[in-house]
Amino acid sequence: MNADTLQDVIDFIAKQTGMPVSQITPATRLGEDLGVDGDDASEFLTAFASHFHVDLAKFEFSRDFGPEAGWIPFIPLPSRPEPVTVKALTEAVEKGAWSNAV
């Protein structure tokens, strides 16, 4: 993983989420650690793909993110098999596309 690319992704995430850069690491999870889910996740990923020119055609949104908060009260979402991490986003930037094997 290229350190410059990682820093660019961290800077982008910090700007989009308001999280301090110092609190974002390669292991930071978009949903669980930063609270990005539902419509916010959709908007984030659209901005991410546009900014970094990443093809997200293979990204399975419903596998990784739930509905907007409040849509289905009192029903816990299933745990995500592999949460979307900063590392995975950085690898997608380096490849130019999302891979489900990321």
Image: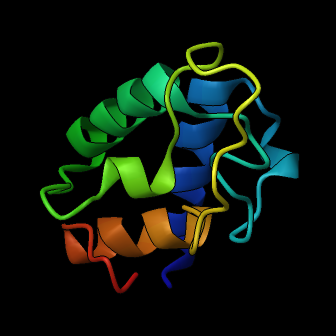
Residue furthest front in the image: 75
Task: In this rendered view, identify the residue nearer to me: 33 or 5.
Answer: 33
Point out residue 38 in the picture as x, y percentages from the top left corner: 50, 28
Q: How many labels were placed on the picture? A: 0
Point out residue 77 in the picture as x, y percentages from the top left corner: 65, 46
Q: Which residue corresponds to the image point at 78% horizontal and 32% vertical from the top-left? A: 19
Point out residue 22 in the picture as x, y percentages from the top left corner: 86, 49
Vertical placement of residue 75 versus 5, above or below: above
Q: Which residue corresponds to the image point at 79% horizontal and 48% vertical from the top-left? A: 33
Point out residue 14 in the picture as x, y percentages from the top left corner: 67, 35
Is 42 left or right of 84, judged from the image as shown? Answer: left
Q: Which residue corresponds to the image point at 57% horizontal and 74% vertical from the top-left? A: 81
Residue furthest right in the image: 23
Q: By what rule are the colours in the image chosen?
A: rainbow
Vertical placement of residue 73 versus 9, above or below: above
Displayed quadrant of residue 74: top right
Vertical placement of residue 10 versus 66, above or below: below
Residue furthest top in the image: 70
Displayed quadrant of residue 101: bottom left
Is 51 left or right of 29, judged from the image as shown? Answer: left
Is 8 left or right of 50, judged from the image as shown? Answer: right
Task: In this rendered view, identify the residue nearer to me: 16 or 32.
Answer: 32
The C terminus, quarter of image? bottom left
Vertical placement of residue 69 versus 28, above or below: above
